[in-house]
Structure formats: structure tokens, C-alpha cells
Image: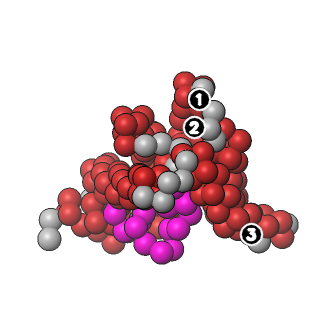
Amino acid sequence: MSEFWIYFQFGLQHVLNFHSYHHVLFLIALAIPYAFKDWKRMLLLVTVLTVGHFLALLLSLYGVINVKSSMIVFLISITILITAFFNLFTAGKSSKTESVNIIFFVSLFFGVIQGLGYAAHFKNVLARHGGSKLLPLAEFELGIEAAQIVVVLVVLILSYLVQTVFRFSKRDWTLVMASFIIGVVLPMIIQSEIWNR
């Protein structure tokens, strides 16, 4: 198996596994207010997330940044919560430009936090395989980007089905999904190790 495929699959599995449900939750929160016609905007937001992830992992791999894992897990949950609440309060409103700017920043921040959270594990993987850090990291990030696009595509398909087959309004779909995400994330925040200090 080629080295590219190993790291690409590793990136896919990083997002598309049960233990990374926080990553999928964020992608759902990011995608729920959008439709297929917004695919360029959605792709930009996902790519910004990947760039943030890449930069944080790169800086961490070279020892520039190091953050405690309990803080990372807490910030990941907070970022998901902020995105879900943003969707909850803006559902049905149409100031797309302003909301894209806010969500653009949140997506970048989530990518950075997620990258920092994964750095220790990725360092172990690189230590086993040896060699360069930059090329495997780029291959890994391509896998992450592909997996994120798959998740967003599934959310957009579900959104389309719910709105056309079951006749939910876009606003109702967004409210229900944002509320669901808030319900999942709040216990994660409450049970965070950060409160045990």
C-alpha cells in the first residue's frame, strides 16, 4: 500500500469513526443551515476547517504550540455549542454575508483546536513510519477534507429529503438539528475535565 493511501485513509478514519463524533457534530452544525445551492460556501467553510487543522498540527509537530488535552476537549465542545446556538438564533433569517464571516472564523478556530487535540496521536504515527513530517501531514489532511465533504454531503442530502419529502421548512430543520446538537454537547461540557481543577 502506498504511503499516500496510508495517510489519506488515516485522515478519512480520523473523521469517519465513532470516537470522533465531536468532529461530525461540528460538521453537522456547520452544514444544517445550507442547501445544495450553497455548495461553494459550504466547501469554503470545510476547507477553512482543514487549513486550521493543518496549521495547528504543523505548529504542534514542530513544537511551536502545545496545549493541555482537557482544555482542547472543552474548547471543541464550546465551538460546537456556539455554532449550534448561532444556527438556533439565526434560523430563518437571511443575513448570509455576516453569518458566513462569523461561521468562517468559528470553522477556522474549530480546525485549529481539533488539530491541536490530535497532534500527540499524529506524532506517534509519524514516529512509527519515520521520514518527513510535511508530506504525510498533507496526505492526512487530504483524507480529512474528503471525509468532511462526505459528512457535509450526507447532511445536505438529509436536509433535502426532510424538506421535500417530509415538508419541514428550512427553519424548522435548522431548529430541530441545532437543538439536537445542543442536547448532545451540553453534557460533554458539563462532564469536561476542566471543571475538576
Q: Quadrant of the N terminus?
A: bottom left
Q: What is the CA distance from the residue labelled 3 to the residue labelled 1?
A: 31 Å
Q: On the image, which quarter does residue 26 sit in? A: bottom right
Label at residue 103: 2
Mark 2, Cα crowd under 10 Å, few <14 / some 14-19 / many 20+, is: some
Amino acid at circle 1: Ser
Q: Nearer the viewer, residue 137 or 76?
A: 76
Q: Is residue 43 visible?
A: no
Amino acid at circle 2: Ile
The residue labelled by disc 1 is 94
Extent of the magenta region? 12-28
Judge depth for marks 3 and 1 and give the one in front. Answer: 1
Amino acid at circle 3: Pro
Q: Nearer the viewer, residue 127 or 24?
A: 24
Estimate the x, y position of residue 27 in percent, counting from the top left. 49, 54
| Marked residue nearer the N-terminal end (3 or 1) | 1
